[in-house]
Amino acid sequence: MVSTLVLGLFFVFAAYSFTIGWGPLNMGSYASNLVPGITLADSNIGLWAALLITIFYINSILTDNVVFTNSVSRITLAMSRDGALPLFLSRIHKTRNTPHLAGAIMVTASIVVGAVSVVVLGGFNAFLFTGTVATLSALLVHMMANVSLPAILHKKGTKIGLVNAVLPVAVSIILVFVFYGTFVSISEPIIVASELFAAWVAFGIFYSIWRAPNVKGYSREDLNALVD
């Protein structure tokens, strides 16, 4: 909880600093700048600072790609083993013991979505589109995790407590306003991304209801056979 508060205060301070540095009356041009932090560093500190931030930015992108690929491929693996997705996605690399097939599919899908978005929408709008879909998806996962905390604690026989009951609900309510602000946006890429996200959620709910009676998982023998 302390780390969350510290991180939240840091983001508030960073947003305030960027606003003051860019100029409150000039924020209209702030949104059209792809990486305003680099621009501010170059104009207020120097070229070396802009280059340093660029290196950090590229490193962050590469790190995010690795983390997301690892996490999504393993989630896909778990869903496959539980029977929610096709069994072939449970294949494990014989030497590296990694879900290489699930990872390859996730990476391929990401490249296709990114490339098509850039071609159709252009670089900046593609960034807004993919970023909005990814952000809304992550927020939804956080909301689901938040509201499930009391149930998980109850299932484990752990005392829930007032904080664990109230805080997840309060955070989820705040995130609802984030969703609302996104869906009423006047930016076309964000509107399209929001609609696509809503359609994907609806599909996920339908698929879960349709697939639930058949989700029984696979035997150990079936899974052991899926080693390449």
Image: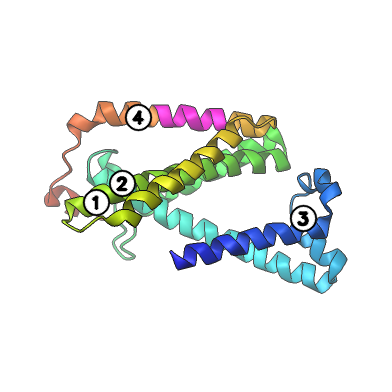
Say whether disc 1 or disc 4 marks the residue closer to the N-terminus.
Answer: 1
Say whether disc 1 or disc 3 marks the residue closer to the N-terminus.
Answer: 3
Asked whether the beta carbons under mark 2 and mark 4 sit within 8 Å of each other, the answer is no
Image point (27%, 49%), residue name: 150
Relative to 135, 148 lies left or right: left
Asked whether the beta carbons under mark 2 and mark 1 sit within 8 Å of each other, the answer is yes
Locate residue 181, reporting x and y percent. Answer: 60, 36
In the image, 189 versus 97, the foreground residue is 189
Task: Provide the residue designation for mark 1.
Answer: 152
Q: Vertically, is 53 above or below 197?
A: below
At label 4, counting other C-alpha atoms closer than 10 Å, the crowd grade (few under 14, some 14-19, many 20 or more) is few
Say whether disc 4 or disc 3 marks the residue closer to the N-terminus.
Answer: 3
In the picture, the disc for residue 205 is 4
Colour treatment of the image: rainbow
Task: Provide the residue designation for mark 3.
Answer: 19
In the image, 161 versus 45, the foreground residue is 161
Tell me which amino acid carries mark 4.
Ile
Q: Residue furthest front?
A: 162
Count of all numbered marks drawn on residues in the image: 4
Q: CA distance from mark 3 to mark 2?
A: 36 Å
Q: Vertically, is 215 above or below 169?
A: above
Which residues fall within the magenta stretch?
194-202
For mark 1, give the secondary structure.
helix
Image point (75%, 58%), residue name: 18
User: Which of the two marks, 2 or 4, is nearer to us in this view?
Assistant: 2
